Amino acid sequence: MKKRKSVRETIEETDNPYVEHRFIKYPGKEPVEVTDYERATSTNDSTDVDKYHRAIEKGNYTDIHTHPTFLDTTKNYPLPSGGDLESFLKTKMRSMVIAVRKASYSGEVIGYTVIRKTKQTPRRGSKNYKQYFEDLKEYEKQTKLYAEKEPEKIATVFDKFAKKYHIRHRLVPIEGYKVNDSGSAFVKKGGLEKRLGLIVVFVGLALGIFFFPPTFTGNTLFNLGDQSYLGIGIIVVLGIFVFLFFRLRKK
């Protein structure tokens, strides 16, 4: 039986990572690409209408598109544009996923923004449906204002908009990356962070061995009983294992 490709594999195998790509995904199935390559740009996914209609079987699908990030800048934009949020409400999609992708030979994905509708999200005909699009104009105005010089503020603008219209969202970095402090971009995990982790592990292990019974280490500096040494040593070593467990789980 042929193994089903993951979303990441499907995205990274597509040509031309310098432009936005669009995919339709149903549960239990591989994503189907619906990009119009002739019109797609780095800021516009340009959907192939025929492919799109063939891919749409029913509602409640996941709409996936990419946001390229270029080599000459550390900036990336995982948060939705006004156009993204317009499409999000107007169509029957259940959720939207924005995949931030390196515009390089590898076309590597570095993280995802997952956006989901809830029961309280406006629907066509609901009383706040029109207001959604009025507020969306202000959202787009503010995000364009902050995009170049203060992109970190876009996260606050989006959080406020999402809260008002009951939209769930979260940023999901892949291994080796993390979300920055403002929640507006993905950044590489720094070397300092890794070195500090190693220092904590080595110091902790050294202390653990130091507090094992003198008969084990040859340490006679303290006049504590063997049981006291053993207890302190075990606590320190267990502390290290707990630290490693939560560190690896976070990754």
Image (cartoon, grey):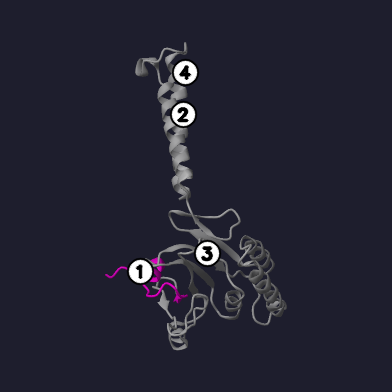
The residue beneath circle 4 is 228
Verify CB contact (< 8 Å) between mark 1 and mark 3. Answer: no
**For the residues bearing labels 2 and 1, Cβ distance under 8 angstroms:** no
- Disc 3, SS: loop
Kindly identify which residue carries mark 2. Answer: 236
Q: Nearer the viewer, mark 4 or mark 2?
A: 2
Q: Which residue is mark 3?
A: 76
- For the residues carrying marks 3 and 4, which lies nearer the camera in this image? 3
Q: Secondary structure at mark 2?
A: helix
Count neighbours of disc 2 (C-alpha within 10 A) and say few if under 14, some if 14 to 19, many if 20 or more: some
Q: Earlier in the sequence, mark 3 or mark 4?
A: 3
Residue at point 46%, 23% (across, down):
231
Look at the image and give the residue range highlighted in magenta. 1-25
Residue occupying the point 47% across, 28% down: 235
Q: Earlier in the sequence, mark 4 or mark 2?
A: 4
Which residue is identified by label 1? 5
Tell me how far mark 4 sits from mark 1, CA to CA. 55 Å
Q: Position of residue 221 (x, y in %)?
A: 45, 13
Mark-to-mark CA distance, 4 and 2: 12 Å
